[in-house]
Structures are given as structure tokens and as C-alpha cells.
Amino acid sequence: MKQTYTLKQKYAQFLRILVPILITQVTMSLMTFFDTMMSGHASPADLAGTAIGSSLWIPVQTGLSGILMGITPIVSQLVGAGEKNKVGYHVIQAIWLSVAVSLVVLLAGALSVSPVLNSMGLEPKVHHVAFYFLVAISTGIVPLFGYIVLRSFIDALGQTRISMMITLISLPLNVGAGYLLIFGRGGFPRLGGIGSGIATAFTYWCIFLIALWIVHRKEPFAAYGVFGKLHRVSLTKWWELMRIGVPIGFAIFFETAVFAAVTLLMSRFDTVTIAAHQAANNFASTLYMIPLSICLALTILVGFETGAARLKDARQYAALGIGTAAAMALATAVLLMLFRTGVAQLYSSEPEVVSLIKHFLVYAIFFQMSDAIATPTQGVLRGYKDVSPGFWISLLAYWIIGLPLGYFLANYTSQGPYGYWIGLITGLAVAAVLLLYRLIMIQRRIASRLIHPAESPIG
């Protein structure tokens, strides 16, 4: 990354950071997309089982990954401030933290997965697939969280193309392993949805080992000496990482967990409805990679400019990013309305399932519009290290407004399963408005500091 002076230069640098992140996020989402699609063609029960398993796993994965991603604004601000000698120490502390987090997740999963699934009253095959899907995923937790730290370090240096290449390499590995194990090809057993869990864990190990080698051996990463000295655990640094990462992680957790909660609440509906909901939700999650990628790019760029005390430049990046997200959301919304029948047929060939998916996809369009504002805005706030408000806004919007409203509409009106989606859309809209308001407040505070330069810069 480098200092820019014009809007054209800023947009060019924004795109250089964004495009590899977007390719990376879409590719990672495609892994889930192909696993879900293949599980759906194995059987509706396999699709429903992986839906339940994913609904339990994804909030944990994304929430805790968010905690570990707290290293991104720390590294970007250190680099912007010219304090590169401190970067390696912070990264190794984040890796130690990732190991501790992994062990806690494994212990919690061992104690809670069976009771949770048993309480849901699932059909026997759906229960079986969900349980062993989660068992398979658990074997890849340690490398996954380690990779999140290494990728955050790589991206914070502006080297997002490296993360892209790692993910592009892993996609055919994931899809190939999933195909062999889900359908029992090449002499492997036919495991259905469980096979997708094994393939995913295998992929986690691959991307971790590749990233480990790159950070240790290749420039510019090797110059930071992340593994040059095996530093002891520092609880003080853990606290610094968690002070930034925990609000980020919980904000992400509240958003992803509310979607998971909806899937679990919908388990009272028939298998076809669960499968259709999961398919539509999976496609919506794939589209969500656009605003999420912009969010990640803005955290890096705003953090870099803030660390260098170029607060006007940080504000310009924020406007460019949020505007780009809104424009892309409008474009994808139009395309989805035109081609939703084809999208639905990607997930199933059964007419009843396809019809339900098409209905759910209409609601997914409204998700995009709010996500285009809320998610990039969170990225800007994280670049400023202003992370606590996002936590409280997510809690309010999703769990106090969105989910209760959805539950009411689904159970006490004629909306049925669509009521949950209406509740989620409402929560997302509230989050978008409140986060944008918070950003305006922060930027006004920054403007005041520009007028009174004796005050220290934010962050």
C-alpha cells in the first residue's frame, strides 16, 4: 500500500485491494455452495442435515474468526505508522490465541452437540448427517483458525493477491474431495452430506499449511520474522487483540447466528421447506461476499490511512467503498430477479423444492440492499478501531428486533416460514441505519480534530 493523492488513485488502490479479496471470499463461499448443491442432489435429507450442521457451525466459525481478525487493523495501523518491527510479535500472539480458541471450541462442541441435536426432534437420517458432519468439521478447527490469523496478516500488508491464490488452489481440492465422498466416486464410500464435512476439514488443513509456508519463506512476509522467534504467550497482548477482536467477532456472530437460529427454528417445518430455505440462504450468503469483501478492504485502507494520521483520505476511502457496494447490490438484485428460476434449479431438480427456493430468493434480494450499507460501514469503523458500537447495534437489530419479529410473523400470522425472512430483513435495515449514523458521528469527530490538530488522531 502507498499514499494516494487523487480520487482516481484511491479508487485504483481500493480495487487492487478489493478484487483479490472478493475473489477469495467468493471462492470460499463457492466451497460451501458446491458442498450444499452436491448434498442436495444426494437427497433432501442430506441437504437438510448439512443445513442443520452448518447452522450450528457457521456462527461459531465466523464469530470466532472475527475475534482473530482483530489483528488486521492492528497490523495495518502499525505499518501505516512505520512501526514494522512490532508486527511479527503481534501476529505470533494472535496465533497462540487461535490455538487456545480452537481448544475451547472443541471442548464445548464435545459437550453440547449431541444434546442440542437431540432436542430438535429431527428425522433420524437428518440427525445422523448433522451429527457426523459436525464431527468431520471439528478435525479442521485448529488449522482453520490458524489460517485466519495468517490470512489477516497477509491482507493487512495489502498483499491480498496471495490470499486469493491460496484460496483458488484450495477450491478444486475441496470440490474434488466433496464429489468423491458425497457420491462415493473413485472407490470412496458414499457418505452424502457427511462427505462434505470431511472435504471441508481437509481443505482447512491445506490452506493453513500453504499460508504457513508462504509467511515463513516468502517476501515481503518473511522480513517480518513472524516465526523467527517463538515468543511466549503474553496475556497482555491477548487482551489487546481481544479488546478489538471480541466486539468484531460478536458483531459477526450475532448476524450469522440469527440466520442459524432461523434455520433451527424452521426445523418444525417439513424437510422440503428446510432444504429450500437452506438453498436460498446459501445463495444469499454467496452474494453477501461482495459487501463483505468491501468491508475487509475498507478495514485495511482506513486503518492504513488512520495510522498515518491522514484522516481526510480515510474518509474518502469510506465514501468510495460504501458507494461501490450500493451500486453492486442494485446490479445483482436485478440479475437475481431475472434468473432466480435457474438459480433454484442449481440446488434441486424436484419441482416442489425449486418452487420454494424461488420464493425465498425474492426475500434474499432485500437482504442485499441493507447489507450493501451495513457491512462496508462496519469495515470503515473497524479501520478506525471503533468496534464496540457495531457489537451493540448487531445485538439490537438482529436479536431484539429481527428474530422476535420473525418468530411472531412465522407462528402467529399466515406468513409461515417467510415470516422469519421478513424479520431478518427488518433487522438488517435497522442495522444499516444505525451503523451509518455511527459512522457519520465518528467522521464529524474526525473533522473536529482536523480543525484542532493539537488533539491526537483517532485509534
Image (cartoon, rainbow, N blue to C red):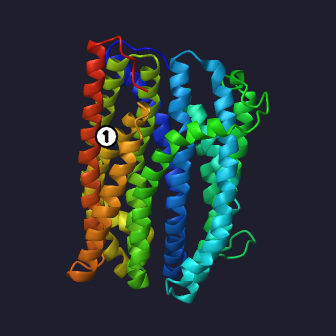
Residue type at tag 1: Ala
Residue at the limit of the structure toward the right, as seen here: 229
Question: Considering only vertical position in the picture, is 103 above or below 357?
Answer: above
Left or right of 356: which side holds 216?
right
Image location of residue 452, percent across then percent down: 29, 13
The residue at 53%/39% (across/down) is 70
User: What is the secondary structure assignment of the residue under circle 1?
Assistant: helix
The quadrant in which residue 268 appears is: bottom left
The quadrant in which residue 126 appears is: bottom right
Quarter of the image with the C terminus is: top left
Q: Name the residue under label 1.
A: 325
Residue 414 seen: yes
Image location of residue 346, percent across then percent down: 43, 66
Q: Which of 105 and 336 is in front in this view?
A: 105
The quadrant in which residue 177 appears is: bottom right
The residue at 60%/39% (across/down) is 151
Left or right of 56: which side holds 286?
left
Image location of residue 110, percent across then percent down: 67, 70
Left or right of 414: which side holds 160?
right
Left or right of 84: which side holds 212?
right
